[in-house]
């Protein structure tokens, strides 16, 4: 399908001017051409310049950025020297963008209908009377339920998946010829993401669109793109067909990136890609990746490699692209420290735990209203053994984080018990718990930017638990802090730094160090790798695993990413609407027989492999509260039996020792 | 929605009640009372004082007097001033009218000007219009009002002779008679209030212009000014509502310095005069009025924010 380029970017360099007056490039001499019907995936770590490149295709540069050299053409039109008027006509017209975070990209004060009408008014030849019908047509094209009702809604009244679909509908309003997608599914649930990817795939095929898909998610790229371009430090390092790049990457960076992704069918930790990309302000003499590359030699550090075109159609910026096979041998994945001699003793028991966020208001109390909504979390009974890692998975709203916060004493529980070390019941709220119990249960949060005090140095951050629980001060405090920092593979020179001077991965290491400083029995991990790049994620997972092996710590690991949970956990509980659907050893939960919800979740995972298609069994409807009676999954279940699912709580079926499925479907049929 | 409204009005009422109690208690606790002040110059003996206190009904327990005072205040009868003759509602009423007049004039100049300048300097951030407006704003905020007022009197009134430099109209005169004397105080006040609101609007416009939805609107091909008026300003001006409300309350509460400099007969000057005269009933009344104004204006601002902000609006309407 590759004819004349439709979007054509030639030798583009983009940069900003630093305070010292120097021009600092964020894109360096990048070429990209997309033909009609082509769909190109743009991959790289954060800061690699991929979003800048995508927006450059629209002739748009963020404040402060300017073109240093190069050309951007769209269907022969020079996008860098074009009148404002013509540019407005093209943007959102023939060339439409689907933004990264639709929740923030939809104007909060305008109704959905108004925003799509605006796109129609600007870019279609529809007569004004037909706008309403046009809006409803677009909303149904992206398969949104109740399109008529939706037009009157404001963006904040929609779920993330719905907002994303509205953004897609808005982009389609002008009947565009090219679509730019800037991480369009980041932050969405797996099932929602899979559904949206299928929608985009169909649209692209139907309309013969040229697509540029920016993402760090190789699974999504594998699903919609036929070509991939990998960027590193503002440069193209590898281009090729999706199969070539994802299955046999010819660049060490792409190789490392792929190895760092946890896979569903592998029971080991992914291979971490050490180091971090250079900052735009650093001067790079040789290959930008040389410092992190296992194949690097003298030449790599002294002269920049050219982008070589290979006979196979790929283009690689590497001196040693013929030696990639050596990397495969070097990177023998360390099989994970399987059962770390799991103790027989129970570290923590959750007994019939229930949590409700809706406090009955004064009026409801007065009138003794019977209409109280069902609890957010209910009937959670789990025993966690010492040294075990329990994974909690589920989509947003599944109550997994709520359970963690309840254990930590940050959310009051409605009923049930939390028992530490078999005998010590924990108070509902953290303020009432004795210091000894507090020390034993530590938590690591999702986003280190929010959980580390930006005005405290790393030393102050680590000193807090050490002072509080061990009364250390002076030299012993400092020595202990350094020891802990070294454990998380950061050195003593980090003590004086502030969190803002650290990279995302380093910050999360500090958060881990703070948790381990208390020498706890149990660590609660709340989506600890979700805010990190995949390569960094692998390193953090590896670190958690090593520390656990040293100290025999028990983890409760919450994540929406099924592959991550599989890689790190011994046992997994699948949650839906705050109720357990299935619980058991990792290997058992991730293989048949399944709970219908587990099946739906696993089927929706997008693997970074163009040959593997997702199986979509359940729709991605969003439920705001669990059903009052019966099975929590009844409304979305593809295998619903009938009224019994609506009335009766599903029976616990023990499939194998320790593997329990809560479902009415008889065991043989699961 | 209605429930929320009732709750807010009720809470506002409670606030005013608590404030009135504090004012009353505060005044009670001061040494001396209306009689020591009234009779002070005659070197009053105990007998005269006692007689006076009996006449003015000061011997009853404070709770009774507080109840009577609040009852009167609700019906608009604020009682008698310390001299025992003048009705407070007449004195305060005239002054309140004058303060309202001044506030209204300053607002109608200052608020639109502030919004306009704020939007302009936000949109042309770090460019000439912004640099001029922001520099002026910093001057307006840092130069004390009495300095800028005096300077303006010197230039506009003494040197150029364009405007009268001082207000000579009596407090009870109708509003129309305050022109053109009121113009100078209005100019100074608008200058000061304008600066605060402008800075706030500017930073809010800058935030919104850097938001994802403005970028999205641009990349959707929305022409610049349409984008500004439809997508950016409605969101950028929301936070301004509360700043504007605070400024209005400040204006209505009496702008003492300006009133003194220009000899303007407003609430602020009455307050100062009454304090130095120990005319405590008047002080109480003014404090109560100012507190009520604050409560009302803030209530209005919150309601307006709620109506203008779709997030809050839908929270209360669609349930």
Image (cartoon, coloured by chain):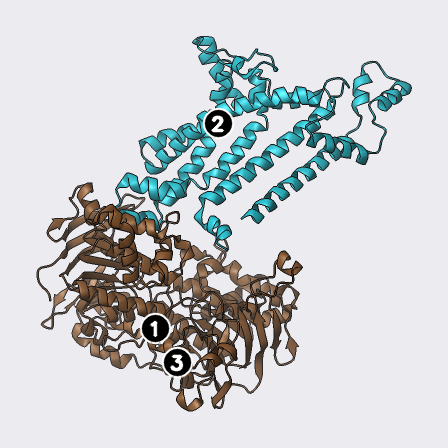
Foreground residue among B42 and A196: A196
Q: Residues within 10 Å of mark 1 (few under 14, many from 20)?
A: many
Q: Which chain is cyan?
A: B
Q: Residue at x 65, y 75 (%)?
A: A425
Residue B275 lies left or right of residue B31; in this view the side is left
Count of marks placed on residues: 3
Host chain of mark 2: B
Q: Which mark is residue A639?
A: 3
The residue that label 1 is drawn on is: A272
Specify the subunit that label 3 lies on. A
| Label 1 chain ID | A
Indicate whether B111 appears above or below A601: above
Q: Which chain is brown?
A: A
Question: What percent of the width, then of the height, locates residue A501?
Answer: 41, 56
Position of B252 relative to A349 (above/below): above
Q: Nearer the viewer, residue B310 or A394?
A: B310
Task: Work out whether disc 1 and disc 2 sit on a shared chain.
Answer: no
Q: Which mark is residue B107?
A: 2
């Amino acid at each position: 399908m590759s004819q004349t380029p439709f979007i054509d970017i030639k030798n583009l360099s983009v940069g900003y001017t630093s305070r010292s007056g120097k021009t600092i490039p964020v894109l360096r001499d990048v070429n990209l051409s997309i033909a009609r019907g082509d769909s190109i995936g743009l991959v790289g770590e954060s800061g690699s310049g991929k979003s800048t490149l995508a927006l450059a295709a629209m002739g748009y540069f963020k404040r402060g950025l300017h073109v240093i050299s190069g050309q951007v053409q769209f269907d022969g039109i020079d996008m860098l020297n074009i009148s404002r008027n013509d540019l407005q006509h093209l943007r959102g017209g023939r060339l439409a963008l689907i933004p990264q975070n639709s929740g923030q990209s939809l104007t909060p004060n305008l109704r959905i209908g108004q925003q799509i009408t605006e796109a129609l008014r600007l870019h279609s030849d529809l007569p004004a009377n037909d706008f309403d019908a046009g809006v409803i047509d677009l909303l149904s094209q992206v398969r949104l339920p109740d399109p008529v009702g939706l037009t009157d809604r404001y963006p904040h009244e929609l779920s993330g998946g719905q907002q994303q679909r509205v953004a897609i509908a808005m982009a389609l309003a002008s009947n565009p010829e090219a679509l730019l997608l800037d991480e369009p599914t980041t932050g969405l649930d797996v099932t929602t993401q899979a559904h949206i990817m299928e929608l985009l795939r169909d649209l692209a095929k139907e309309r013969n669109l040229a697509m540029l898909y920016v993402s760090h998610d190789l699974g999504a790229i594998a699903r919609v793109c036929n070509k991939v371009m990998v960027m590193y430090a503002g440069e193209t390092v590898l281009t090729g067909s999706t199969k070539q790049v994802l299955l046999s990457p010819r660049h060490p960076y792409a190789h490392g990136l792929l190895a760092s992704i946890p896979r569903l069918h592998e029971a080991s930790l992914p291979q971490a890609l050490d180091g971090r990309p250079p900052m735009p302000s650093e001067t790079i003499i040789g290959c930008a990746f040389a410092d992190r590359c296992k194949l690097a030699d003298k030449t790599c550090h002294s002269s920049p490699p050219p982008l070589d075109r290979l006979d196979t159609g790929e283009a690689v910026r590497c001196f040693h692209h013929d030696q990639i096979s050596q990397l495969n041998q070097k990177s023998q994945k360390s099989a994970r420290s399987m059962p770390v001699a799991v103790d027989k003793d129970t570290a923590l028991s959750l007994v019939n735990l229930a949590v409700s966020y809706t406090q009955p208001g004064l009026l409801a109390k007065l009138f003794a209203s019977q209409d109280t909504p069902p609890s957010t979390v209910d009937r959670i009974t789990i025993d966690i053994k010492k040294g075990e890692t329990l994974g909690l998975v589920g989509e947003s709203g599944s109550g997994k984080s709520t359970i963690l916060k309840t254990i930590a004493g940050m959310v009051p529980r409605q009923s049930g018990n939390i028992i530490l070390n078999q005998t010590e019941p924990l108070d509902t709220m953290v303020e009432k718990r004795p210091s000894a119990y507090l020390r034993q249960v530590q938590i690591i949060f999702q986003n280190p930017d929010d959980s580390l005090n930006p005005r405290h140095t790393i030393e102050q951050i680590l000193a807090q638990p050490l002072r509080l629980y061990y009364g250390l001060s002076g030299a012993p405090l400092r020595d202990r802090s350094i020891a802990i920092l070294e454990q998380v593979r950061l050195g003593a020179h980090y003590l004086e730094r502030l969190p803002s001077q650290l990279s995302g991965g380093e910050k999360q290491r500090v958060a881990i160090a703070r948790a381990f400083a208390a020498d706890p029995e149990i660590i609660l991990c709340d989506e600890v790798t979700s805010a990190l790049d995949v390569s960094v994620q692998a390193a953090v997972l590896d670190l958690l695993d090593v520390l656990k092996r040293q100290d025999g710590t028990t983890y409760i690991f919450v994540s929406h990413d099924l592959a991550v949970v599989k890689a790190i956990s011994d046992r997994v509980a699948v949650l839906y609407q705050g109720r357990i659907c299935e619980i058991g050893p990792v290997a058992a939960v991730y293989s048949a027989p399944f709970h219908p919800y587990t099946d739906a979740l696993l089927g929706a995972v997008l693997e970074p492999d163009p040959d593997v298609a997702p199986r979509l069994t359940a729709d991605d409807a969003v439920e705001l509260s669990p059903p009052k009676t019966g099975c929590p999954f009844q409304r979305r279940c593809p295998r619903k039996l009938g009224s019994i699912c609506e009335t009766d709580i599903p029976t616990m079926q023990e499939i194998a020792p320790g593997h329990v499925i809560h479902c009415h479907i008889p065991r043989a049929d699961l | 929605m209605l429930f929320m409204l009732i709750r807010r009005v009720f809470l506002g009422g409670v606030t005013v009640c608590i404030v009135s109690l504090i004012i009353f208690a505060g005044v009670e606790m001061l040494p001396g009372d209306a009689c020591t002040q009234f009779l002070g110059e005659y070197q009053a003996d105990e007998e005269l004082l006692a007689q006076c206190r009996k006449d003015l009904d000061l011997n009853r327990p404070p709770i009774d007097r507080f109840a009577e005072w609040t009852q009167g205040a609700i019906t608009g009868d604020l009682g008698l001033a310390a001299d025992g003759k003048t009705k407070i509602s007449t004195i305060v009423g005239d002054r309140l009218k004058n303060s309202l007049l001044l506030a209204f004039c300053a607002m109608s100049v200052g608020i639109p000007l502030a919004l306009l300048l704020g939007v302009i300097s936000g949109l042309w951030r770090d460019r000439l219009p912004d640099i001029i407006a922001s520099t002026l704003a910093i001057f307006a905020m840092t130069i004390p009002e009495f300095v800028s007022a005096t300077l303006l009197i010197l230039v506009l009134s003494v040197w150029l002779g364009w405007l009268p430099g001082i207000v000579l109209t009596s407090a009870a005169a109708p509003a129309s008679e305050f022109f053109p004397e009121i113009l100078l105080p209005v100019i100074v006040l608008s200058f000061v209030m304008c600066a605060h609101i402008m800075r706030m609007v500017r930073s809010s416009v800058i935030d919104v212009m850097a938001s994802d939805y403005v970028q999205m609107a641009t990349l959707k091909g929305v022409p610049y000014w349409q984008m500004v008026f439809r997508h950016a300003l409605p969101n950028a001006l929301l936070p301004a509502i509360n700043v504007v409300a605070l400024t209005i309350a400040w204006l209505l509460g009496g702008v003492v310095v300006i009133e003194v400099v220009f000899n303007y007969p407003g609430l602020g000057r009455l307050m100062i005069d009454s304090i130095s005269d120990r005319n405590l009933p008047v002080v109480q009344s003014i404090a109560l009025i100012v507190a009520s104004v604050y409560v009302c204006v803030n209530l209005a601002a919150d309601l307006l924010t709620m109506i203008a902000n779709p997030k809050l609006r839908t929270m209360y309407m669609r349930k």
